[in-house]
Image: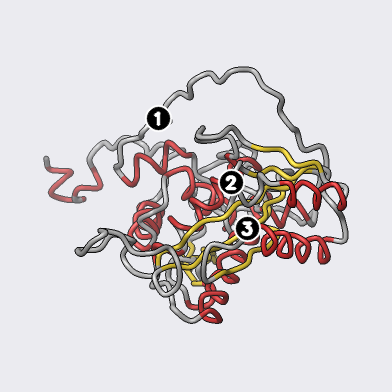
């Protein structure tokens, strides 16, 4: 007690700080990112920070944001059927249509309790996805549900910039695709159409997942404009953000553009190590990279928004002076 009176609390016997303990400002950065982007889960936050230079494990992020983990439900075994596997870029394309409500939905207070699925109540969007790189090839906007001829014209416009014709085109059994005119067009273009099972969710899972992402992280987080040019600009920003900045789980946190154009992965660049006593030779959260600067460097969290859209975040870190 005399030593405490003379030297203060520093004279007490203290346990050494664990080597693998992250500083408090790392916790603040993760929690702040969760507040700014509440739709992000722990795995997506870990991948985004990894691309920015801070390597954290998924479980570490989960503990920091104090959210219970929800394991993905086990998928029921599906019957054996022919599967088309993409072996190279532009080998297999997916296409589908979806209706994007302009207001709060299609439900109305008056009879017949629903609004017609056409402009000015919604937009129809057609999309094309490359299976091999999960990259959005293109999209088109329609004021009403398009016919088969219009969709064929849209697909023809998508073939010109790619300068290549896919071998397979996967779509559902909608009357737009399941008709003799569409099949003749595919034969003339040298494309083999493949159809998902009617009424079975997940039979065209790749394009359905993209549409779900487009709605959950795009159109449902912002006011959908009624002007075609404004809505086209919104979708252009989303497709650019999806291909360039959104980490994809299939590619271990890389973006479709990084894989498609063989660019250097952002999560492979030298990382920021905020733990002062962390040995340089020790591994970090996957993927393991070298340390930029010195262990214990502080950093500033920078969140920008592509095209001014608050839901299209671009996260970066810079070492503080």
Figure quadrant of the N terminus: top left
Residue lying at 55% horizontally and 39% vertically, measured from the top left: 285
**Any part of residue 89 in sight:** no
Q: Secondary structure at mark 2?
A: loop
Regarding residue 306, the answer to whether it shows in the image is yes
Q: Which mark is residue 174?
A: 2
132 above or below 25? above
- SS category of the residue bearing label 1: loop
Residue 313 % position (x, y):
49, 65
Q: Give me the C-alpha separation between circle 1 and circle 3.
A: 30 Å
Q: Residues within 10 Å of mark 2 (few under 14, many from 20)?
A: some
Q: Residue at x 63, y 52 (%)?
A: 176
Q: Is residue 247 above or below residue 85?
A: below
Judge depth for marks 3 and 2 and give the one in front: 2
Q: Of the numbered discs in the image, which one, if any, rests on residue 71?
A: 1
Q: Secondary structure at mark 3?
A: strand
Q: Give above or below for 87 relative to 5.
A: above
How many discs appear? 3
- Residue at 75% from the left image edge and 42% from the top image edge: 193
Residue 34, horizontal then vertical, whole percent: 36, 55
* Image spot of residue 85 (x, y percent): 75, 33
Pick the residue in front: 57 or 189: 189
Ranked by sequence position, the earlier of labels 3 and 2 is: 3
CA separation in Å, label 2 and label 1:
33 Å
């Amino acid at each position: 007690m005399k030593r405490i009176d003379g030297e203060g609390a520093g004279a007490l016997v203290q346990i050494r700080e664990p080597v693998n303990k992250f500083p408090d400002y790392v916790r603040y950065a993760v929690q702040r990112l969760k507040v700014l982007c509440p739709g992000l889960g722990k795995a997506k936050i870990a991948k985004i920070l990894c691309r920015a230079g801070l390597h954290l494990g998924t479980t570490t992020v989960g503990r920091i944001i104090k959210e219970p983990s929800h394991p993905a439900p086990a998928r029921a075994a599906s019957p054996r059927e022919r599967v088309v596997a993409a072996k190279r870029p532009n080998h297999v394309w997916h296409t589908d249509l979806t209706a994007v409500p302009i207001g709060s939905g299609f439900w109305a207070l008056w009879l017949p309790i629903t609004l017609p699925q056409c402009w000015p109540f919604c937009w129809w969007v057609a999309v094309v996805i490359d299976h091999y790189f999960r990259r959005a090839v293109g999209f088109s906007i329609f004021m009403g549900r398009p016919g088969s001829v219009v969709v064929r014209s849209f697909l023809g416009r998508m073939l010109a910039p790619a300068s290549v014709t896919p071998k397979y085109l996967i779509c559902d059994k909608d009357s737009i695709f399941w008709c003799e005119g569409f099949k003749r067009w595919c034969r003339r273009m040298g494309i083999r159409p493949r159809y998902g099972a009617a009424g079975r969710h997940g039979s065209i899972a790749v394009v359905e997942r993209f549409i779900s992402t487009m709605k959950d992280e795009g159109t449902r987080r912002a006011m959908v404009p009624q002007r075609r040019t404004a809505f086209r600009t919104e979708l252009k920003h989303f497709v650019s953000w999806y291909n360039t900045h959104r980490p994809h789980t299939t590619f271990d946190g890389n973006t479709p553009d990084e894989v498609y154009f063989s660019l250097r992965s952002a999560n492979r660049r030298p990382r920021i190590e905020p733990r002062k006593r962390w040995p340089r030779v020790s591994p970090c959260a996957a993927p393991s990279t070298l340390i930029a600067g010195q262990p214990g460097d502080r950093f500033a969290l920078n969140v920008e928004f592509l095209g001014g859209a608050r839901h299209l975040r671009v996260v970066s870190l810079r070492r503080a002076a």
